[in-house]
Image: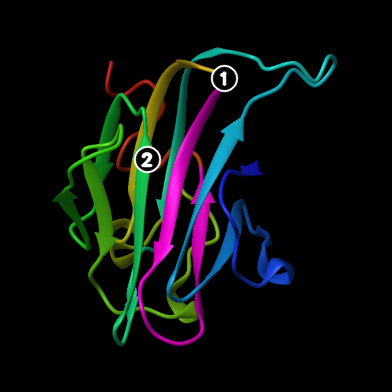
Amino acid sequence: MKFKSPYSGKTASNVVFGDLFQLNLQANSTVTIEFQLVDSSTTQPRQVDEVVMSVLDLDTSGSVHQRVRAHGFKAVHHGDGVKREQVVGGDSPYLFRGINPGDHTNNPDNSVFLSPKQLNNTVTFAFVKTSSWEITFEVTEGAGGRNFMLGGESELMPAMAHC
């Protein structure tokens, strides 16, 4: 995981949470992160046929919204609590925005066994024939920060389900 743009958040809050990784981002900020798969014995990039990544807990708190924009995905599925918005420019035609209120009490701790509310606040991307991909995370105006939960396949799109 490598920051491709300036990061503003609580680094101490960027932790493993159950089976997920929790990423904290300050309100009124955006960060693009490159995720890369590497061979553990050589540390060289390792291309795979498919990798699935879920961003969970996309929600709102007052006027603060969480948004994501994945770059170069092959397929995407999202719950009813995530609004897909068409955007102009860049290599991703869509921005995904959480629209349901939420707080830490409904955060998932894995990407597979989700409550209906947790599933509704999830977006899952599939990337093919790659060793790396980028996702831009954004927290809109407001105070404080928000946590994004990152995981693998979800009930929305198990691995290889879209092929």
- The residue type indicated by label 1 comes to Ser
| Magenta span main SS | strand
Q: Residue 72's mark? A: none
Check disc 1 and report the residue beneath it: 131
* 18 vs 49: above or below: below
- The residue type indicated by label 2 comes to Ala
Q: Position of residue 149 (x, y in %)?
A: 51, 58
Q: Residue 70's mark? A: 2
**CA distance for labels 2 and 1:** 15 Å
Q: Quadrant of the N terminus?
A: top right
Instruction: Tell me if I can see residue 112 in this picture.
Output: no
The structure residue drawn at horizontal position 22% and vertical position 63%, both measured from the top left corner, is 81
The structure residue drawn at horizontal position 55% and vertical position 26%, both measured from the top left corner, is 132
Secondary structure under tag 2 reads: strand
Side of 48 relative to 53 (left or right) = right
Side of 109 relative to 88 (left or right) = right
The structure residue drawn at horizontal position 25% and vertical position 40%, both measured from the top left corner, is 77
Secondary structure under tag 1 reads: loop
Stretch in magenta: 131-151
* 29 vs 122: above or below: below
Q: Position of residue 98 (x, y in %)?
A: 28, 65
Instruction: Tell me if I can see residue 95 in this picture.
Output: yes
Q: Quadrant of the C terminus?
A: top left
Along the viewing direction, whichever of 28 and 156 lies nearer the viewer: 28
